[in-house]
Image (cartoon, rainbow, N blue to C red):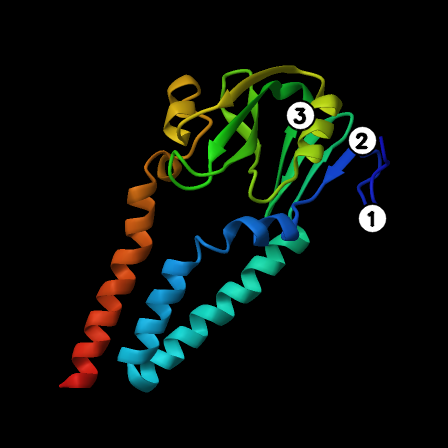
Amino acid sequence: MPGPPPGSPPGAALVLRPSLRRYLSTVKWSLLPIVVLLAALLLRGGGFGAVVSLIVIALTSSIGPAWFRRAALTVTPSELAVTGLIRTRRVPRDAVGSIVTAALPRTHKNSRSLAHLYVLDRGGRRLARLKGGRWVEDDMRRLIATLGVETFKLGRLASPRALARRYPHAVPLLERYPVLAGALVVVPTVVAIFLISREFSS
């Protein structure tokens, strides 16, 4: 197994990082509704709509790459560390109870499935997760081999909600109800477009 990359924490047995190439290859169509909404805001909102659209685009284009540069999952002889955009969460390595893998559809149940890996503690609570849209399968296999705990391979499931029925503490609430998650993004944007359009048309 290849050693940790340069700059890894001392004693690190394994350091994994998300794949920007994988993300760009899987996310492009899911960004289409956001692009359409921003275009509508730009066209209907006049100068103010253009400013808002540019701000959203600038924030999105900066936060995403920053996360990919910083994010990592590190395994040492004593701990598991998960680094996100803001902070690093560390747990003792002996707190890891099991690993669950499942193939989940990217969007609707008939769409292409991607591998997902969940690291759980002894009470079934999620310690770390590798999503198929950001992490490659080879790294998932390396993590399984390095942690050496019991692994449950569920195969293809219809949705994250199906996984949550077996492991209720592994899947976040918004992923169990993707329509709700989408509404939290789309509805405020549509309302903003309507209000801006009304303001500039009066």
Disc on the earlier residue, 2 or 3 = 2
Q: Is residue 157 above or below residue 63?
A: above
Q: Is residue 193 above or below residue 124?
A: below
Establish if 186 lies above or below 167: below
* Residue 21 position within the rendered picture, expressed as x and y whole percent measured from the top left: 65, 52
* 46 sits to left or right of 98: left
Residue 138 shows up from this direction: yes
Tell me if residue 45 comes above or below residue 67 in the rendering: below
Lateral position of residue 153 relative to residue 36, left or right: right
* First reached walking from the N terminus: tag 1 or tag 2: 1
Under circle 3, the secondary element is: strand
Could you say which quadrant of the image residue 47 lies in?
Answer: bottom left
Residue 13 circle label: 2
Q: Residue at x 67, y 36 (%)?
A: 81
Residue type pointed to by label 3: Pro
Which residue corresponds to the image point at 44% horizontal and 20% vertical from the top-left?
A: 167
Which residue corresponds to mark 1?
7
Residue depicted at 75% across the width and 24% down the height: 146
- Residue 86 coordinates in the image, percent (x, y): 57, 51
Q: The N terminus appears in which quarter of the rendering?
A: top right
Q: Are marks 2 and 3 in contact (CB under 8 Å)?
A: no
Marks 3, 1: nearer the viewer: 1
Amino acid of disc 1: Gly
> Where is residue 68 shown, x and y percent of the image?
63, 53
At numbered mark 2, what does the secondary structure look like: helix, strand or loop? Answer: loop
Q: Residue at x 47, y 32 (%)?
A: 104
Q: Residues within 10 Å of mark 1 (few under 14, many from 20)?
A: few
Disc number for residue 92:
3
What amino acid type should be assigned to the residue bearing mark 2? Answer: Ala
